[in-house]
């Protein structure tokens, strides 16, 4: 069982930056692809970005491409999400998730383990 814990969320103004962390306990993250998803108020949970187990491949939703960057530090069992140039429409609860056997890397159903989420609020 992989236990994931997100941190780093907060309330910022438009244009600001945040760095989210996804720390794992119970098992190493090394074999897992890691994804970040978000759920905005009144909307379904959506894909944001993901990274392969090796870290060599990354995937981004069009809405965040060029502004968000995912990275991983397998030695410290942590995955990061750098959020730059934040917009009010980025306001959401952000979740990290682990997938042992990713196919598309973007589908929620491929991810078996989920964190509790961290709130990001961007004011205009």
Image (tube, helix red, strand yellow):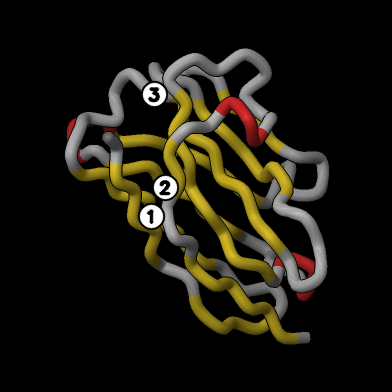
Q: Element under label 3?
A: loop
Q: Nearer the viewer, mark 3 or mark 1?
A: 3
**Rendered image: mark on residue 65:** none
Vertically, is 41 above or below 83?
Answer: below
Q: Quadrant of the C terminus?
A: bottom right
Per the image, the residue denoted by label 3 is 32
Q: Please report the residue visible at 38 percent of the width from the left and 42 percent of the height from the top.
A: 79
Q: Secondary structure at mark 2?
A: strand
**Residue name at image x 37 percent, y 35 percent:** 72
- For the residues carrying marks 2 and 3, which lies nearer the camera in this image? 3
N-terminal label among 1 and 2: 1
Q: Residues within 10 Å of mark 1 (few under 14, many from 20)?
A: many
Q: Residues within 10 Å of mark 3 (few under 14, many from 20)?
A: some
- How far is mark 1 from mark 2, CA to CA? 5 Å
Please tell me the numbered disc located at residue 80.
2
Mark with earlier residue (2, 3)? 3
Instruction: Tell whether 108 sits left or right of 97.
Output: right
- Tell me, for residue 21, which label it has, or none: 1
Q: Quadrant of residue 29?
A: top left
**CB of mark 1 within 8 Å of CB of mark 2?**
yes
Identify the residue at image location x=75%, y=72%. 41
Estimate the x, y position of residue 113 in percent, counting from the top left: 43, 38
* Image position, residue 47 (x, y; %): 69, 42
Name the residue rendered at 38%, 64% in the picture.
Answer: 7
Precedes in sequence: disc 3 or disc 1: 1
**Figure check: 122 above or below 33:** below
Horizontal placement of 99 versus 90: left or right?
Answer: left
In the drawing, does residue 47 fall left or right of residue 44? Answer: left
């Amino acid at each position: 069982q992989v236990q994931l814990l997100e941190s780093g969320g907060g309330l910022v103004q438009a244009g600001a930056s945040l760095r989210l962390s996804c720390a794992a306990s119970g098992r190493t993250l090394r074999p897992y692809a890691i994804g970040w998803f978000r759920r905005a108020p009144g909307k379904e949970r959506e894909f944001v970005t993901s990274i392969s187990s090796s870290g060599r491949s990354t995937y981004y939703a069009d809405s965040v491409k060029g502004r968000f960057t995912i990275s991983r530090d397998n030695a410290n069992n942590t995955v990061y999400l750098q959020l730059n140039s934040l917009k009010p429409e980025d306001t959401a609860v952000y979740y990290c998730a682990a997938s042992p056997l990713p196919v598309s890397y973007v589908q929620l159903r491929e991810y078996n383990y989920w964190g509790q989420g961290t709130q990001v609020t961007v004011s205009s």
